[in-house]
Image: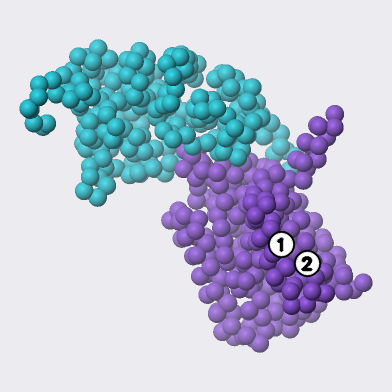
Amino acid sequence: MDYILNIVLLACINMIAVAGLAIFTGFTGLFSLGHAAFVGIGAYTSGVLTYHWNLPFIWAISAGMAAAGASSLIIGIPTLRAKLRSDYFAIAILGFGEALRVSLENLPWTNGARGLSLDELSGPVWVIGALVICLFLTHNLLISRFGSLFAAVREDPVAAEMAGINLFRTRLLSLVVSAALCGVSGALLAHRLAFIQPVMFTLTQSTQLLASVIAGGMGSISGPMIVAFIFSLLPEALRGLNMWRLPAYGLLLVLIMTYRPQGIMGYQELTDIFRKARKRFK
Amino acid sequence: MNDSLLEVRDVTRSFGGIRAVDALSFDAERGKITGLIGPNGAGKTTVFNLITAVYRPTSGSIRFEGVDLTRKRPDEIVRCGVARTFQNIRLFKRMSCLENVMTPLLARVACGPLRALFCGPSVRNEKRAVQEKAYSIMEALDIADVADRNAFTLPYGQQRKLEVARALACAPKLLLLDEPAAGMNDAETEELAGTIEKVRRNFDVTIILIEHHISLVMSICTYIVVMDRGALLASGTPREVREDERVVEAYLGRRRTGGKRS
């Protein structure tokens, strides 16, 4: 039972980060190969605070969230102001992520590549509570005017600007919110696993986040949430396949992208499907 | 011309060695429809891109109600009261038609990110008001019946109308229409002429129109600016322009053979 609970909680933590990236990539249309860096910043900020200063967990999470959001400004302001095209931006943020990993390995208070041992503070209440709050805030943001502005920027940046949208500010807002969610995810992850080291936050993790968003569907939150949950459980469920686990995972991804290139829930939500079904029923 | 809304003065834009727009000056009179015509590649769309800051002029000034536009961002220019459509339609394809028209209105709503994050319901009411406004704009252009459809599913002519509706949602004083009749047959073009005239009256806008259907331009424009190879070739009333030898030459070539093109 503990084993299953542990896996479900890790899945929930992963879902928070994926929700963050879904706002940025799925709704605003910018690809990122570096969002694991924001998870890492959240993890290390909160970890250092509880490890060295024994700060209450809630403050550690908040600090992790704030640090991730603030650090996204460092990469976001220069690149988004220059209106880098999506693919160039993805590369720029990839560099940011790798630079962060090297920094973490060499800073004095992170214990370098050996990692940091922490207390296991993220219980089920913390994790599920945080997931509910994060999804509630994400939902609020996306049904507000910003949801429409993000989508307009994704669909056609030039036309969006000519509709009176400040491209830079809208994209930056999307980045900061998504990074902050990744920061929360990182803080919870650090105190769930009770151990963090820099290699946990590299390109591999960024790619997995991105895979969940794209397989789940651009312009959707429920799709990436479903996929993030399944993808987190899959490696455990497929344990019987032994070394074929990763090929099976890859094969699933290929199948989704072949037969449903727009992702499982491309440009719609679960609620839209329910609404359509109800209409047809009547 | 004493009451001009837009003043373009000596505007030049070079791309590498090519002068796409060369020392161009013209005015758009308030409340009127100004036609911008010329052969393909004359630089007409570049002029629109310069007015809306998609490109910056290499030199020269563009003043709108006395305010210099050449240092502003595109979204600031929209806020000043300039809106446009695009030659190769640029709709928000995977959004509904209504959402397309709502977008410029939502861009103006005063609601910060923090309020959006924490107050769901009150924000929803604001959105409803915007929805009604957008719907009324679509009604004015006779496309309200497609409000719920995805923009990319519309037939071509209606996509053009939807773009005009979205531009009108910016509450512009100056509307730039880039080849609104492209790809339309004669009957559709005639209907479009009526629509443009109606838009000018009902929404109280000044219009600059780029168009290749000369009959359309001649029938609804009060003033016409003719460009050729980036420079001003002629300007005046439709009658003056039609009788101008240089204009006829630019479109049809010289009357007598053997002459060198200047």
Q: Quadrant of the N terminus of chain A?
A: bottom right
Judged left or right of residue A17, residue A161 is left
Where does label 1 land, which residue?
A: A252
| Image location (x, y in percent) of residue A26 | 63, 52
The label on residue A74 is none
Where does label 2 land, which residue?
A: A234
The scheme the figure's colours follow is by chain
Residue type indicated by callout 2: Leu
| Image location (x, y in percent) of residue B152 | 57, 35
Callout 2–callout 1 Cβ contact below 8 Å: yes
**Is A94 or A63 nearer to us in this picture?**
A94
Chain drawn purple, letter? Answer: A
Q: Quadrant of the C terminus of chain A?
A: top right
Residue type indicated by callout 1: Leu
Q: Marks 2 and 1, how far apart in space?
A: 10 Å
| Image location (x, y in percent) of residue B90 | 49, 37
Q: Residues within 10 Å of mark 1 (few under 14, many from 20)?
A: some
| Image location (x, y in percent) of residue A37 | 60, 69
Chain drawn cyan, letter? Answer: B
